[in-house]
Image (cartoon, rainbow, N blue to C red):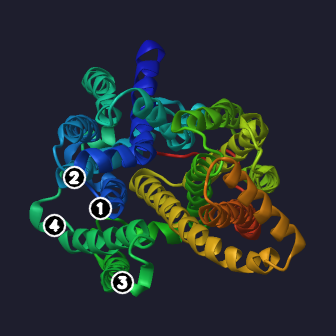
Amino acid sequence: METGFTKWIIVITVVLCTLLELIDTSIVNVALTQMMGNLSATQQEVSWVVASYAIANVIVIPMTGFLAEQFGRRNYFFVSVVIFTLASIACGQSTNLWELVGFRFVQGIGGGALMATSQAILIDTFPPKQLPLGQALFGMGVIIGPTIGPTLGGYIVDNYDWPWIFYVNVPVGILAGIFTLLFIRDPERIKNAIPRPLREIDWAGIGLLIMGVGSLQLVLEQGETEDWFDSSYILLFTALSIIGIVGFIWRELTAAKPIVDLRVLGKSRNLAVGAFLSFVLGFGLFASVFVFPIFTQRILGFTAAQTGLILLPGALASGFMMPLIGKALQNGVPQKFLLPVGFAIFFVFTIWMSQRISPTAGESDFFWPLIVRGVGLGLIFLPITTMSLAGLQGKDAGQAAGLTGMIRQLGGSFGVAIVGTYLERNLAANRVAQLPNISLYNTQTAERLHAFTQNFIARGFPTNQAQQQAYAALEGVLMKQVSLITYSQIFTALGIFFIACLPLILLVKRGKAGEKIDLNAAH
C-alpha cells in the first residue's frame, strides 16, 4: 500500500489516464465537420472515426483482467499508455479518412485498458478504510471525461486545426508512461501469477467476444446512419452480434479457464443488479451529453466552445460531489439509500430541462439544471460501483470491474443510438402533427405569411419570389417549433426511463458490516 507523495503521484497518473480515455470518446464529435472538409469524407464515412474507437473500447474492457494477469498489470498499463499516445500522434498525422479510422481503432485498444486498469490501480493504492475515496477519484474521471470532451474539442476546433484534438494527449501520455514505470507496482498476487500457456488461452471466447460485442457496438454506432433494419449491412451485423453474444455466454459459462468469467454474476446478486444499473447510468450519462450540444448548436446557434463551457460547471459539480459521497459511504451510509436520491435528482434535471427548452433560452437558463445533473450522476455512479464490487475478492473483483465497465459503455452506446433515432423520427412525426395548425385558411397563418411576404418585398424581392421566400420562412418557423417540442420530449422520456428503473434498487442486498472490496487482483 503506497503512502505520501508516491500515493498521490499514482492517483494523478491514473485519473488523468481515465480522463484522457473518456474525453476521447466525445472530443471528436465537434470536429467531424472540419474532418469532412479536410479529408474529403461524407458524413456517413466520417462517423467511422467515432465508431472505430468505441468498438475497440468495448472489446478490450472485459478482457483487461486476463491481459493484466497474463502480462503483469504495470506492464499492461504502461504498454496501453504507449499504444494510446503513439496512436494519438498517428491520428493527427493521418492524410486520409481510413488511415484515421484505423489509428482510432488502435487508440481505442489502448484507451479501453486505461480506464479499466486505472480503477484497479487506484483501489490498490488506498487502504481498505479509504476504498470509497479511491472509487470517488475514479468516478470523477468517468463522469467528467465525456462532459468536458466537447468543451476542449470546441475550443481546439475554434482556434486550431482538428489534429490538435489528438496531439493534446501526447504530453499527458508521456508523463503517465514515466510515472507508471517509476511509481506503479503490481500486487503480490499478480507478481506471483504464472502466465497461461498459449494452448490454454480461451481463444474461442476471445473470438466470440470480438464478433458479438464488436458487431453490437457497430450496429449501435452505424444503425441510424444506415437507416437501421432497412439496411442489409445492419441486418448482417445484427445477426453476427446475436450469434456471437449467445456463443460467448455459452462458452464462458462452460470453459474451464474463460477469458471473461461470467459465473461471477451468479456469486453476487448486488453485482447482477449493479451491472444493469451501470447500463442505466451509461445510458443517461452519454445520452444527455449527446443531445444537449445538438440542441444548443442546431436550434440556439451556440458555438461548440460555448456549448462546452455551459456543460463544464455540471461536470465540476460531479467532481466536487465524488469525495463527499465517498466519505458518506466510508461512514456507513448504505448505497441502497443514496441510489434513489441520485435517480430522483436526475429525474428533476430531465423535467427541468424539458421546461427550459425555448427559442429564447440563453446560457444562464441551463446553469442550474446541469449542476443538478452533475450532483445526480455523482450520487448514482459511486454507490453502484461500490455495491457491485463489495464482497468480491481476487479474480472475481477483477472480472466484475471489467464487466460493469463494458456494460456501462454499452449503455452509453444504446443511449446515443436510441436518442439519435428518436430525435430524427419524432421530428418528422411532430411536423405532421403540427401541419393542421398552419392551414392557409387559418387567420393567424395567413397573417404571418402576409407579413413575411411584405417583408421580403420591402427588401427588394419581386412579388412571386417574395411569396416563395415567405413559404420557406414559414417552414423554418414550423421546424423550429417542432424541434423544441421534440427535444423537450427527449428529456422527459429520459427522466421517465430513470424513474422506471427505480424498483430495481429494491433488489439490492444490504452489505454486511465490515464487508470490503478487494480489488488487489483486479485487472
Q: Is residue 498 left or right of residue 447?
A: left
N-terminal-most mark, 4 or 1: 1
Whole-angstrom CA distance, mark 3 to mark 1, is 16 Å
Q: Residue at x 64, y 60 (%)?
A: 466
Q: Amino acid at mark 4?
A: Glu
Q: Amino acid at mark 1?
A: Glu
Whole-angstrom CA distance, mark 4 to mark 1, is 40 Å
Observer-side mark, 4 or 2, equals: 2
User: What SS does tag 2 mark?
Assistant: helix
N-terminal-most mark, 2 or 3: 2
Mark 4 highlights which residue? 200
Give residue 185's quadrant in the image. top left
Sort mark 4 into few (<14), some (14-19) or many (20+) by Cα contacts within 10 Å. Answer: few
Whole-angstrom CA distance, mark 3 to mark 4, is 40 Å
Vertical comparison of 163 with 427: above or below: above
Q: Position of residue 317 (x, y in %)?
A: 68, 33
N-terminal-most mark, 3 or 1: 1
Q: Position of residue 218 (x, y in %)?
A: 35, 68
N-terminal-most mark, 1 or 2: 1
